Image: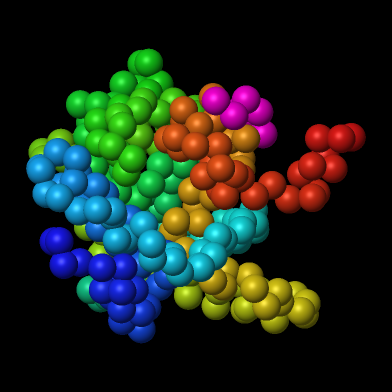
Amino acid sequence: MATLTSSDFARYRDERLKIRKGNTVKRELALFQCVIEVARREWGIHMAENPVRMVSRPSYNDERSRRLDAIEEQYMLGALELRERRADGTYADASHNPWIRPIVQLAIETAMRRGEIFELRWKHVSLERRTAHLPATKNGLPRTVPLSPKAIHLLKDLPRSLCGRVFPTTADALKKAFVRGLERARLKYLGDCEVAQVMPQEDFLINLRFHDLRHEATCRLATKLPNLIELASVTGHREVNMLKRYYNITAEELAAKLA
């Protein structure tokens, strides 16, 4: 470790930027810096300075402000609705996974991350107290999420799995079903526009990611919880600056508050 220099990490940074995004490389450099700092302070490894501190971080802006329109939500949920197998053994052009639509609805209602939803257990859900406890979250701190009446109604209608998970499916299944659902919703929208003889919106149901649902949920919650401390306790953000990234309120919504 004593032979490590800032030039070594600068070369590492440049090589990684060829195959990874800048934000990923920034996190990796931060990890290296933390490990070396612990080695210097607690493990007795002598280094005059932490070489990673001297390395410039790549500039990268991955902030998104994609909001989910109410009509988009209607089409999306319609495309994710479960359809039974036909009499001839074939499936209708809809979702075959019964968990996808409830996962999307719960994400919009609670602003929970995808990983938090998959780790949700029935033993941590209290419909009487209207809460869902998350022992393990992205930032390492547990939190308890309040449940809206819509979220409670959604959870009450879900079947219980023997494994104890609220949603016994996989992240890969969600990813594939979500993408296919958006494609079906887009086709349905274009067909309706053709019948109605109206010009379709170019960005309707385009460039929408599952994580954008967390943005949308945070913005909707902000209208009910204007106190940032209360809002952060629901979303799990530790810093107001990070919370601000997810709070993308529109000018129309601000105008409505001024009315």
Q: Percent x, y for residue 120?
A: 26, 38
Q: Is residue 218 above or below residue 95?
A: above
Residue drawn at x 36%, y 57% is 53
Q: Quadrant of the C terminus?
A: top right
Q: Quadrant of residue 9?
A: bottom left
How many discs appear? 0
Q: Percent x, y for residue 189?
A: 61, 72
Q: Is residue 116 left or right of residue 61?
A: left
Q: Is residue 110 left or right of residue 2?
A: right
Would residue 110 be counted in the magenta stretch? no
Q: Quadrant of the N terminus?
A: bottom left
Q: Is residue 180 left or right of residue 228?
A: left
Residue drawn at x 35%, y 67% is 25
Q: Looking at this rendering, what residue extends furthest in the right direction?
A: 259
Which of 75/239 is in front? 239
Would residue 228 be counted in the magenta stretch? yes
Which of 162/8 is in front? 8
| Residue range (magenta) | 223-229
- Residue 13 visible (yes or no): no
Q: Percent x, y for residue 163?
A: 11, 40
Q: Quadrant of residue 178?
A: bottom left
- Residue 154 visible (yes or no): yes
Q: Is residue 119 above or below residue 156?
A: below
Residue drawn at x 64%, y 73% is 203
Q: Looking at this rendering, what residue extends furthest in the top direction?
A: 129
Q: Is residue 232 above or below residue 207?
A: above
Q: Percent x, y for residue 140?
A: 28, 37
Residue drawn at x 31%, y 78% is 11
